[in-house]
Image (cartoon, rainbow, N blue to C red):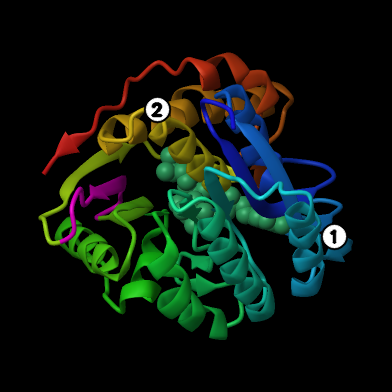
Amino acid sequence: PSDTGRVLSIQSHTVQGYVGNKSAVFPLQLLGYDVDPINSVQFSNHTGYPTFKGQVLNGQQLCDLIEGLEANDLLFYTHVLTGYIGSVSFLDTILEVINKLRAVNPKLTYVCDPVMGDEGKLYVPEELVHVYREKVVPLASMLTPNQFEAEKLTGLRINSEEDGREACAILHAAGPSKVVITSITIGGILLLIGSHQKEKGLKPEQFKILIHKIPAYFTGTGDLMTALLLGWSNKYPDNLDKVAELAVSTLQQALLRRTLDDYKRAGYDPTSSSLEIRLIQSQEEIRNPNVELKAERY
Ligand code: ATP
Ligand code: PLP
Ligand code: MG
Ligand code: NA
Ligand code: MG
């Protein structure tokens, strides 16, 4: 094993553009991780375009890949990262994979982005919610829902920062010691709320970061955000607030600014369609983010 970590990243792949593994693998590699991607789908482009074509990996095919690794004694991982998962059967197989990897490395960190929907809309089958809630959340070490997903997982309506903090506490009780609500809108203000329960039963340490809302719609940013949170967490295991500052600063200062500027320079209206992030062009800032957005402790 390497000194930084070896990540099994089970996410979407797109031929063109940056979502899923395409937006998570490169930054994790830049931060020094060995990353082993399993592509849960291979699509021509992300699903926000007028059309897409491609293949979906099923649970049995995921099992085959894991069996191949197992047969060669290659199942040692420090981290598993999962994002968008489209079916119950695939999610059930992921649960088996986590249990298998935990048997090999009891210290395995499972970082779960419970991608189910956004802005009041579910974009996975309804029956997935139950599986996430009952079976996946209990296995997760770090969970990175957005506001809508945190509501789905807790049954709470999140209308205030207090509600957001309570949702985090409920999620801690269900399993993960680290919870980051990656985006939440309260009174027109965009923020991130983080929560670290350092010991079971203890009051979690909680913080927020105010995010300057850029008037454009990006794809791949949720996947990138979770990858950055994983990447920096390993370096600062006891400072989730610092980790979130680094991740948000990378996204805001570097990536989204650059993406917006590049599109504008090319004559596009950035509010008219979802923008592909300028990931490769931002590699210096990914390695060395300039922290300008500060976390505020509650
Ligand atoms: P999920 O992966 O569960 O869908 P999410 O809904 O939080 O998570 P995004 O909406 O992509 O994912 O947000 C992730 C992060 O990207 C936010 O914390 C924020 O830093 C940044 N971000 C995305 N869109 C914008 C925007 N328009 N303006 C400013 N920051 C943004
Ligand atoms: N995976 C695929 C295949 C997608 O098409 C998309 C968005 O269109 C995503 C993941 C999600 O990206 P985001 O990180 O913006 O939530
Ligand atoms: Mg969102
Ligand atoms: Na998220
Ligand atoms: Mg998302």
> Viewer-proximal residue, 109 or 192?
109
Question: Would you identify the image quadrant in which residue 169 lies?
Answer: bottom left
- Which corner quadrant of the figure contains ligand 2? bottom right
State whether residue 296 appears in this view: yes
Drawn side of residue 55 relative to residue 251, left or right: right
Instruction: Residue 196: say if magenta.
Output: yes
Number of numbered discs on residues: 2
- Residue on which disc 1 sits: 52
Answer above or below: position of 31 versus 179: above
- Mark 2 secondary-structure assignment: loop
Question: Would you identify the image quadrant in which residue 237 lies?
Answer: top left
Image coordinates for residue 224, horizontal then vertical, percent: 56, 40
Amino acid type for the residue under numbered disc 2: Lys
Amino acid type for the residue under numbered disc 1: Phe
Quarter holding the N terminus? top right
Asked if the beta carbon under badge 2 is closer than 8 A to the nearest atom of ligand 1, the reply is no
The tag on residue 80 is none
- Mark 1 secondary-structure assignment: loop
- Residue on which disc 2 sits: 235
Looking at the rendering, the stretch of residues picked out in magenta corresponds to: 187-200
